[in-house]
Amino acid sequence: MRKIVTIIILTLTLTSIGQNTSIDRIDNKVNQINSDTSLTMTQFDLNKVYDLTNNGSGIFKIWKSPSEIKKITQLSYHSYGKTETTVYLENGQPILIIENENHFNLKTTSSEPEYEKEMETVYQDRIYCINWELDPIHVETIGQRILTEGICGLNDYSGILDKGMELTKE
């Protein structure tokens, strides 16, 4: 019985260490992508990309090496603030997805936003994709969603990836 407990504890410890190593590797790769000045950034009007109009505007950005997309950012501006989703890729597969929801603070005398002040990040998800195909992830969440809906699974991000691929082929 003692051997079984020891084996279980050892297995859990090694799994935890392996996941932390994967997260560190992903963070290092993301830092490399962000500091790579050789990447070409292309920017699109979000409303034209999705053929829609909303209560604001937005930007769809793609950072690309000659052979592959390295980063995609979808940024939507709204009357209350902005939402932003950034996907980092390695070999065509997402390795980190960052979702932000930023809001203007409301004036104390009314319910109008204080546009002259900086927005506050009310929510952030950092989704580490250990293996996109098998769906194992590690999620770090700060804050709470206020006006955006939660994502059900990694497949919900495939639209951003597909749009990025489509736009780079044009």
Image: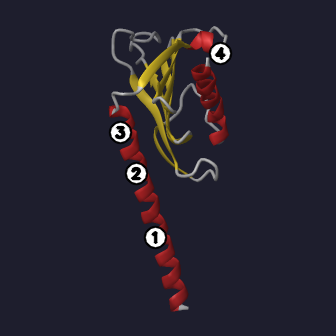
Q: Quadrant of the C terminus?
A: top right
Q: Residue at x 66, y 10 (%)?
A: 52
For disc 2, the neighbor class at 10 Å (few under 14, some 14 to 19, many from 20) is: some
User: Given the image, on which type of amino acid does mark 4 rest?
Assistant: Tyr
Alpha-carbon span between mark 2 and mark 3: 11 Å
Q: Which mark is residue 25?
A: 2
Instruction: Say whether residue 45 is visible.
Output: yes
- The local secondary structure at tag 1 comes to helix
* Vertical comparison of 54 with 75: above or below: above
Circle 1 is placed at which residue position?
A: 14
Q: Earlier in the sequence, mark 4 or mark 2?
A: 2
Query: Which residue is at 46% across, 35% downward?
Result: 124
Q: Which residue is mark 4?
A: 50
Q: Is there a contact, CB below 8 Å, between mark 4 and mark 2? A: no
Count of marks placed on residues: 4
Q: Position of residue 87 (x, y in %)?
A: 51, 34
Q: Amino acid at mark 2?
A: Arg
